[in-house]
Amino acid sequence: MIKVTEQEVLEVIRNTLSLQKDTLTIESGAHNIEAWDSLGHLGILSALDKLFNGEIAPIKEVAAADSVSKILQLLDKHSLIDTKK
Amino acid sequence: MNIEIKAIEYYLPLRTEDGKTLTGDNPDWRIAEIEQKTGILTRHVAAIDQTATDIAALAAEKLFVSGIEKEEIDFLILITQSPDYVLLTSACILQDTLGLKKSCIAFDINLGCSGFVYGLAIGGALCESGFGKNGLVICSETYSKYIDKSDRVCRPLFSDAAAATLLGSATSDNLGPFELGTDGSGFSDLIVRSSGARNANKNSEERRLFMDGAKVFMFTMDAVPQCVMNLLKKSQKTIDDIDLFVFHQANKMVIYNIIDKLKIPKKIFLNSHRVGNTVSASIPIALKDALQQGCLKKGDQIMLIGFGVGYSWGGCLIRWGDM
């Protein structure tokens, strides 16, 4: 099973939404990032699935995770976050 | 199965909508971004008084103009989720409209984007079991009638169209195997909630198409690669053995995700930029376009994969014939 750090997840979301550095924090989400609209969200899901080599697709709850904190919580719940690094 | 696709014709409604149309109705939409991600630039919209049965007839008549005899049609399978009436099989109306013989078997299949593959499976099985030698599998949809002008999720994607496919007995094994599946737990993610007996008295909002794009996308990312791999295993083939993959033309983002996951190199056909997501009609329309653009030749091994509303999915292999 692939594990990544919180920072790597943030970087993938930032790159997918073409955001400037430091504009994405743990507080960010569809509610305060304009590019995180419905299509932006699909882009994030696709990028995360790629990051985790296809292990995200079966986790259906990720579809509704529309903020950084919700995504990190879900990934952590499924033991996909590396907390040791 | 000793069955082959003998002919395909399609009809696209004359009225089209592009980015300008969408921003005219919705000035706040970032249309360039939507088009870049979906890859869909133009969609067709049926006239107010034009139904899926009407455009199905127009597609089928093109087959008959090309020399196919109506007397030869033993069955008619109409795949649609936009029937003229909830209670009345649209295929029966179509049998009469087209002037097909009264011994013709006619029925509807209520499936969306997986529908064409199911139509091939059932049509092929009808031929193989002696119910007829030739039949029509017609995919026809007018989702536009369920979509509000301000619906940013559905309107940029779905397009109205009909495709008529002549299926018939052959002397060699050209169709199959199939990989069909269902996961009804996702039924509420793509639905017109008050389109039938349940919720019949709900307000007009409930009569519109609802799609939870993120959930449908997750389903696609999970189910479609598995369907492809299961089909390859079942047929004892590898990706390299397939000459062309024709996926349901959902949109660019979905298809690129699938081919990225499966590492399919440049062996896909895409035409959704021109015709949009035409639901069950998308695969036969793509096959016809691929043929006309020289992307198909006799003997090619093609994989067809449909997936979507239900959730439902279906894949099959076809060996391209003389069409």
Image (cartoon, coloured by chain):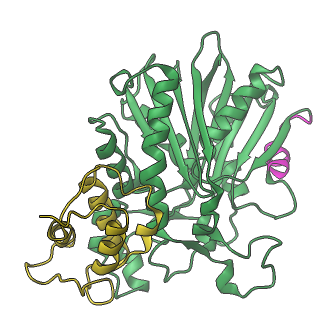
Number of marks in the rendered image: 0
Q: Nearer the viewer, residue B26 or A41?
A: A41
Position of B190 relative to B237 (above/below): below
In the image: residue B76, left or right of residue B179? right
On whether residue B95 falls in the magenta region, the answer is yes
Q: Is residue B106 visible from the viewing direction of this image?
A: yes
Left or right position of B310 against B228: right
- Chain letter for the yellow colouring in the rendering: A
What residue sits 58% from the left and 25% below the top? B177
Across and down, in percent, residue B273 comes to: 37, 56
Residue pictured at 83% horizontal, 41% vertical: B106
Looking at the image, the residue that sits furthest to the right is: B102
Characterize the magenta stretch by its predominant secondary structure: helix
Is B52 a magenta residue?
no
How far from the left and from the top, in percent, is residue A26? Answer: 22, 83
- Looking at this rendering, what residue extends furthest in the left direction? A21
- Check the picture and name the quadrant holding the C terminus of chain A: bottom left
Query: Up-down: is A77 above or below B281?
Result: below
Say which colour chain B has.
Answer: green
Residue B92: image location, x then y, percent: 85, 48
**Does residue B47 appear anywhere in the picture?**
no
Kindly identify the residue that appears in the image at 64 percent across and 47 percent down. Answer: B139
When the figure is inspected, residue B282 is found, relative to residue B215, above or below; the finding is above
Residue extending farthest top: B171
Residue at the image point whose x is 29% and y is 73% from the top: A72
Query: Which quadrant of the figure has residue B295?
Result: top left
Most foreground residue, A74 or B26: A74
Please identify the quarter of the rendering in which residue B254 is found: bottom left
Is residue B190 shown left or right of residue B258? right
Magenta part of the chain: B91-102
- Counting from the top left corner in percent of width and height, residue B57 is at 71, 49
